[in-house]
């Protein structure tokens, strides 16, 4: 049975089809952000509590309160509690109209009448109203309600998702919960492959987890290897866009000759062989020097091997399984961007040919790989991430971007993410950017982002019919990150330093 909460009142600007206010019943358990329902001639009217104010006529005139409080508290003279009341402001979202055995959603064209009772939102109707699905991904529960937040996987991921928050607000925890749900998904409900670009080694713990480990593969940055046969003029051009068009044409000729020789003579080549070929070719000196500089850099990166391929995306991207690309062992940011560029391009091509299952590509610290203001020469991964954001959904390649600096993230990428999971953000520039790129979020919710606690988030966009506050559930998987706690490192450092001093003194004494 739904509890009564209060009664609709008439104010200067409500009730309307957009908002209304109600006075709370005594000890009514109403909270800001809670969904409520009332009725009009059209049916059930849903809304959420946008604000709550308290009033008491005994405290309306400041001079009277000050005068009484000089001698004794005003409560000793008057029954102030009996005059206190609270008013909740409700933003109208829509209505549920019953037709035969089913409910249908539609817009409100008639406001509720003053005097109408307001009650708690019915849980079953609320699930349908918000857009939850029984077989959806369980991210947590709807805040202020005992309703599980089960989100439809297709609506959440197909048109891409952005998870935005400041450092320490719970991004990694939220991502881990999402990954658990994707790996727990039954075959008959549709499973997808998962590829994670893990910058800080935050998801390698899945490999050690007894429940998930056998379905997780981890490839470290230093072990990534691209076979020479995968080197194409298009890949080279995207990695080294500052090479002139003449240089790229000459590179294409040399590479084409080597590929023919490789096929006919069954000979394996390397970047060193490619450099020798360019050095021996009759290319103009200026063009040759520019091309060789790029090839020397490519050789130093040690990404291209003769035949070794790691990861093997065709074999390792599987339904319901996760491939973690752990780049935490690499210091070179350019090398990380080249790796992301190659893997993202490869995934896009494989999905376009339907050679791997529908896939979710999640990019941590996405503002580093698809920055808003940056030259292409320094960001070879930006163009492919934007391409997946624009076209990936047509081929079943879903994109997830995680960032603590959304203002620095490519506007093209962010605007194509039709669902946003917003955790705590306090930077004014980031908030402004989120407000401009997140459809359906109003100023009230935007202000609420700064006060979210760890584990609380706002889900807005394609995945739900209305922006909602959710409490992210506890993770089931083992949490294991690279690196040791700071205090342990500090203790070890001083212990080793003292030990070293003692050893030096012993050596000196022995010498003397």
Image (cartoon, grey):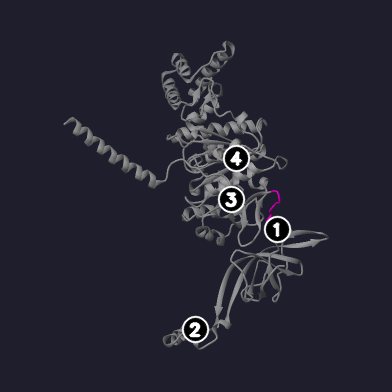
Q: What residue is shown with label 1?
A: 129
Q: What residue is shown with label 3?
A: 420
Span colored in magenta:
127-135
SS for dot 2: loop
Task: Name the mark on residue 212.
Answer: 4
Q: Residue at x 72, y 59 (%)?
A: 124
Q: How far is mark 1 from mark 2, CA to CA?
A: 44 Å
Q: How far is mark 3 from mark 1, CA to CA?
A: 19 Å
In the image, residue 134 lies in the stretch drawn in magenta: yes
SS for dot 4: loop
Residue contact between numbered discs 4 and 1, judged by CB atoms under 8 Å: no
Task: Name the mark on residue 61.
Answer: 2
Label 1 or label 2, whichever comes before in sequence order: 2
The C terminus - image quarter: top left
SS for dot 1: helix
Q: How far is mark 3 from mark 4, CA to CA?
A: 26 Å
Where residue 495 appears, x then y in whole percent? 32, 42
Label 2 or label 4, whichever comes before in sequence order: 2
Res 354 → quadrant: top right
Q: Residue at x 71, y 43 (%)?
A: 189
Picture layout, residue 291 above or below residue 422: above
Q: Is residue 161 visible?
A: yes
Residue farthest along the front direction in this orientation: 510
Label 4 or label 1, whichever comes before in sequence order: 1
Q: Residue at x 73, y 69 (%)?
A: 39
């Amino acid at each position: 049975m739904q509890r009564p909460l209060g009664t609709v009142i008439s104010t200067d600007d409500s009730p309307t089809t957009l908002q209304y206010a109600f006075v709370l019943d005594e000890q009514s358990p109403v909270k800001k952000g809670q969904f409520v329902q009332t009725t009009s001639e059209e049916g059930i009217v849903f809304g959420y509590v946008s604000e709550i104010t308290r009033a008491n006529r005994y405290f309306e005139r400041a001079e009277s309160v000050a005068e009484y409080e000089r001698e004794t508290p005003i409560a000793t003279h008057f029954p102030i509690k009996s005059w206190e009341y609270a008013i909740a402001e409700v933003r109208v979202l829509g209505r549920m109209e019953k037709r035969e055995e089913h409910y249908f959603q539609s817009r409100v064209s008639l406001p509720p009448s003053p005097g109408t009772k307001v009650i708690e939102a019915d849980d079953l109707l609320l699930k349908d109203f918000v857009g939850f699905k029984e077989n959806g991904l369980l991210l947590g529960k709807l805040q202020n309600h005992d309703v599980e937040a089960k989100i439809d996987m297709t609506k959440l991921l197909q048109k891409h998702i952005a998870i935005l928050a400041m450092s320490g607000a719970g991004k990694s925890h939220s991502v881990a919960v999402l990954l658990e749900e994707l790996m727990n998904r039954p075959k008959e409900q549709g499973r997808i492959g998962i590829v994670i670009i893990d910058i800080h080694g935050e998801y390698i713990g899945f490999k050690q987890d007894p429940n998930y480990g056998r379905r997780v593969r981890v490839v470290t940055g230093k072990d990534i290897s691209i076979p020479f046969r995968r080197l194409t003029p298009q890949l080279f051009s995207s990695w080294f866009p500052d090479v002139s068009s003449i240089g790229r044409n000459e590179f294409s000729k040399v590479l084409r000759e080597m590929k023919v020789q490789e096929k006919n003579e069954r000979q394996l080549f390397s970047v060193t062989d490619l450099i020798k070929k360019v050095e021996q070719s009759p290319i103009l000196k200026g063009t040759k020097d520019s091309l060789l500089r790029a090839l020397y850099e490519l050789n130093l990166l040690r990404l291209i091997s003769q035949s070794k391929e790691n990861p093997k995306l065709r074999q390792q991207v599987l339904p319901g399984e996760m491939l973690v690309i752990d780049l935490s062992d690499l210091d070179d940011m350019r090398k990380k961007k080249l790796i992301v560029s190659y893997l993202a391009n490869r995934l896009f091509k494989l999905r376009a040919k339907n050679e791997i299952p529908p896939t979710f590509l999640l990019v941590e610290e996405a503002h580093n790989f698809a920055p808003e203001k940056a030259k292409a020469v320094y960001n070879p991964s930006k163009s492919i991430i934007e391409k997946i954001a624009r076209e990936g959904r047509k081929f079943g390649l879903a994109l997830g971007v995680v960032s603590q600096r959304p203002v620095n993230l490519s506007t093209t990428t962010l605007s194509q993410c039709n669902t946003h999971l917003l955790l705590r953000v306090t930077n004014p520039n980031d908030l402004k950017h989120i407000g401009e790129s997140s459809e359906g979020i109003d100023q009230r919710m935007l202000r609420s982002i700064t006060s979210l606690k760890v584990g609380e988030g706002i889900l807005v966009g394609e995945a739900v019919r209305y922006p909602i506050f959710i409490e992210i559930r506890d993770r089931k998987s083992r949490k294991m990150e690279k690196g040791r706690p700071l205090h342990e490192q500090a203790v070890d450092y001083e212990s080793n330093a003292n030990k070293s001093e003692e050893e030096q003194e012993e050596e000196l004494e022995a010498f003397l």
